[in-house]
Amino acid sequence: MFSYRLDQYPNRNVVAHWLLLGFNAGCINAGGFLATGRFVTHVTGFATMFGADLLHGHVAASFSLLSVPLFFLLGAMIAGLLTDRPLHRKHAPRYDYVMALCAACLVLAALAGEFEQFGRFGQNFRLRETYFLLALLCLASGLQNGAITSSSGSSVRTTHLTGLTTDLGLGLARLLTFRPSDKRFRQETRADLLRAGTICAFVAGSAAGAGLFLSLHYRGFLLPAAISAYAAWHGRRLKHVPHHEEAVVP
């Protein structure tokens, strides 16, 4: 889960875990949207909503909304401090800590929602009541994305599709450039299949999450929390290696 790079021959277990976290991100994003009317695993939409609110004269609300993506940034920063920084210092990365924090954010979102701290599910889109929920979900998304990006040498991302789709488009163009007998053609083919698989996993997680959250409401966040907890357990088994070496899982 925390040891793959696109220039390596894919290990089936690692790829399956990567797709699982793509599914997880899609599920979180669906829950965030159905609960608050806003997507949470990527920050692009917040800039658009900031501009729209500012145009309508909602200055305080617009700047409050613009601050929400900072929690995604905070999550990525925490992930970097617990994984990327130790790796560069030849110390053991703590992917387990990062994903455990992610799971804790999602459990807290589920519990607080059940105790009506965010209003009725899907019927309260006011920022004042949903701000804490948005912050928790963005923080969880930033933690997951930071852990995967760090562990893969910036070759894998799971919480948003914009960059991944761009990489896929560039990869498909490279396939038209390289000869099938070229080693780079085979490497790019594997990479493009994995990118396409991650996109499909995210979409599948979004679809499954929509059904889950419409049925269970805030309790639906317990599923991505369980997946994150599993990732934390798996991260605890990872042995430390420098960035340029292959990670080993016993």
Image: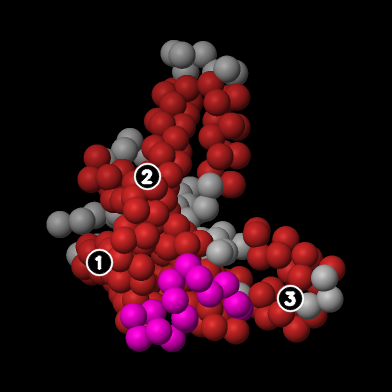
Looking at the rendered structure, the kind of residue marked 2 is: Ala
SS category of the residue bearing label 3? helix
Where residue 239 appears, as percent x and y from the top left, is 24, 63
- Few, some or many C-alpha atoms within 10 Å of disc 3 (few <14, some 14-19, many ≥20)? many
Magenta span main SS: loop
Q: Provide the residue designation for mark 2.
A: 204
SS category of the residue bearing label 2? helix
Q: Provide the residue designation for mark 3.
A: 62
Q: Is residue 105 left or right of residue 222?
A: right
Looking at the rendered structure, the kind of residue marked 1 is: Ala
Q: CA distance from mark 1 to mark 2?
A: 17 Å
Where residue 153 appears, as percent x and y from the top left, is 46, 54
Q: Check the image and report above or below for 102 versus 184.
A: below
Circle nearer the N terminus (1, 3): 3
Query: Which label sits in the foreground, 1 or 2?
Result: 2
| Labels 1 and 3 touching (C-beta < 8 A) | no
- Few, some or many C-alpha atoms within 10 Å of disc 1 (few <14, some 14-19, many ≥20)? some
Where residue 74 appears, as percent x and y from the top left, is 54, 76
Q: Is residue 203 left or right of residue 114?
A: right
| Labels 3 and 2 touching (C-beta < 8 A) | no
Q: Provide the residue designation for mark 1.
A: 226
Circle nearer the N terminus (1, 2): 2
Query: Which label sits in the foreground, 1 or 3?
Result: 3
17 or 221, which is in the foreground? Answer: 221
